Amino acid sequence: MDAQEPKSVRGLSAAYCLAQAGHKVTILEAALAIGDVGAGIQASPNVSRLLIRWGLRPRLEELGVKPEALSIRRWTNNEVVGWTEFGDAMDKAYGAPYYHIHRADFHRILYEATEPHCNIRVGCRVVSLDPSKPSLTLASGEVVYTDLIIGADGVKSTTREYVVGGPDKPKATGDAAYRAIIPTEKLLQDDDLKVLVEETDSIIWMGPRGHMVGYNIRAKKEYNVVMIHPDETEGGVESWTAAGNADKMKEYYKGWNITVEKLLALVPSTLDWKLMDREPLPRWIHKDGKLALLGDSCHPMLPYRAQGSAMAVEDAAVLGNLFSHCSDRSQITPLLYAYQTLRYERATATQTSSSLNQHIFHHPDGPEQEERDNEMRMAMEDAFRVARGEKSTLVLAGNANQWADKEKSNIQFGYDADEEAEKWWLANGDKLMTLVPSTEAAN
Ligand SMILES: Cc1cc2nc3c(=O)[nH]c(=O)nc-3n(C[C@H](O)[C@H](O)[C@H](O)COP(=O)(O)OP(=O)(O)OC[C@H]3O[C@@H](n4cnc5c(N)ncnc54)[C@H](O)[C@@H]3O)c2cc1C
C-alpha cells in the first residue's frame, strides 16, 4: 500500500512504523530541511520504550540526559515544595527511562531511523487535498496520488480542515512560552547555578500567572529553559522561530529568586510561542476513509505536561501495529477507525490533564497557593520515604503535583502503545477483517 505523510517530525515516526509494517511511504515536508529548530523535549517512558524498541537506545543515551528527579519550587525563594523521583525509579516503575533531549537531536534520531525505509521529500508544501481519491496538491502544482494520507502537519494543520469540514478555532490561553538554550559551561562558572548542571533535576519554578521549566540537554552541554508568561502581545504566533523580547522577558521575572534571575541574565535573546488551546476534535478521520490525522493536527496540547510529542509517537506505533495487518486497500478504512478507537480517549485525557497544570502552577501567592504547596509537600515527604526504601503511606490521587499521583503516572508513563494495539487486535482483529471483502492486493 502507498501512504503519503504530508509532513514530518512525529510524521517521521508514523512513516517509520508504516514502513516497518511493510508499506511504501513518502513524507511530504514543507520545510527545506529537517532543521535545528525548537528547544528541549521531554521523552517520558511511554515514548522512550518505543524508541528503544526501534533500536534507538544508544543514540538516546548519547544525546539525551536522564533527570534524577522532578523538583517543583517557589518563585520567590527557590524553596522545593514538590519532588518526584525520576532516574532509575522511572525505569523500575514503568520499564523505560525518562530522557531530556534537544528537539533537533530528537528529529535527527528519528530521521536516521526512517530515512533508509521511506522517501523523504523536503520543500514540498501541501496546499490542498482531494480526500476521496486521495491525492495531495503541492505548492509547485504537482499532484501526488496515494492510497492513504496521514496528516501529521502540526498545530496549524491544513489536513485537519478537510477532516472536520471547517477552519480551526483556537482560543488564546493568555500564556506564551519564551524559550532559550544556555551553554552549561556558563552555569558551571557560577556558584549559584552550577548545581543545576551537577544535579540534573528537571525544575519547575511556579509563580503568579507564570512558571519556568529548566533542564539539561545534549549530554549536559546545554541547559534548556522554557518560560511560560502572561501573553500581552496581540500578534503573537505559534512558531518555533518567532523572536521574543529578551528585555521584556527579564522584566517579567524580576523579583523571582536569585537562581532564576542569574539564569536569565545569561540569555541574550529568546524565542516566543503564543500558547493556543483547542477543543478535542469530533473525529480524526475524513468521511471517505482514506485520510487520518496524527499528532498535533488532531490533539494539539498545551506543553504543561510535556506529552505532545509522546502522544504523536504513540499514535504512530498504534498505526504501524494495525497496518501490519493490512494486505488489501479495502482494509484501510476499518483500520483507520480502529486507530481512532484505540487512541482518541487517551490523547483527549492527556490534553485535559495538560491544561490542568496551567491552573495549578499559576496561583498568585495566597490561600490557594498555600493549599497547593502544602499538598505538594505532603507528596514530597512520601516520595522521600519511598526513596529511602520505606513504604508509601499516602494515597496521592488528585495531588497538585500530578507526577506524584501514582495512578495518573501509571496510566501516562506505563502505557505501551504496541501492547495496547496487539491486545486490541487479538480481541477484535478477526471480526474487523471479516467485515472487509478481500479483493485486491494493496502493495
Ligand atoms: C514550548 C513548547 C514545549 C514543548 N515541550 C514538549 C515536551 O517537552 N515534550 C513533548 O512530548 N512535547 C512537547 N511539546 C509539544 C510538541 O512539540 C508537539 O506536540 C509536537 O511537536 C507535535 O508533533 P507533530 O509532528 O504532530 O507536529 P510538528 O512537530 O508541528 O510537525 C509538523 C510538521 O509538518 C510540517 N508541515 C506543516 N504544514 C505543512 C504543509 N502544508 N505541507 C507540508 N508540511 C507541512 C511542518 O513543517 C512540520 O515539520 C512542546 C510544545 C511547545 C509549544
Image: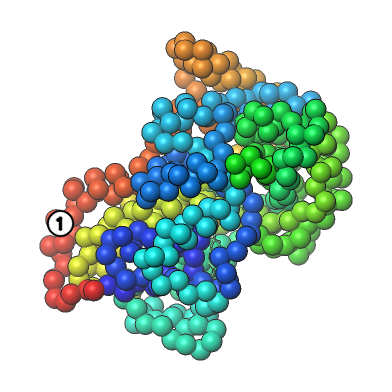
Q: Nearer the viewer, residue 42 or 344?
A: 42
The vertical placement of 244 against 70, above or below, is below
Ligand 1, seen in the image, is in the quarter at bottom right
Where residue 171 appears, x then y in whole percent?
A: 63, 58
**In the image, what residue occupies the spot 46% across and 30% down?**
90
In this rendering, the answer to whether 386 lies above or below 264 is above
Residue farthest toward the bottom in the current orientation of the protein: 141
Q: Which residue is pictured at 61% across the width and 45% down the height?
A: 218
Q: Quadrant of the N terminus?
A: bottom left
Q: Amino acid at mark 1?
A: Lys
User: Which residue is nearer to you in this view: 88 or 257?
Assistant: 88
Image coords of residue 420 (percent x, y): 30, 45
Point out residue 47 in the picture as x, y percentages from the top left corner: 44, 45
Residue that sits furthest to the top in the current view:
390
Label 1: state its secondary structure: helix
Q: Residue at x 69, y 62 (%)?
A: 241
Q: Which residue is mark 1?
A: 431
- Residue 294 shown left or right of residue 222 in the figure: left
Q: Residue at x 18, y 47 (%)?
A: 427
The residue carrying pointer 1 sits among few (fewer than 14), some (14 to 19) or many (20 or more) residues within 10 Å by Cα, namely few
Q: Is residue 260 visible?
A: no
Quadrant assignment for the C terminus: bottom left
381 or 11, which lies in front? 11
Task: Determine whether 205 is above or below 355 in the image.
Answer: above
Q: Position of residue 183 (x, y in %)?
A: 73, 45
Q: Is residue 2 visible?
A: yes
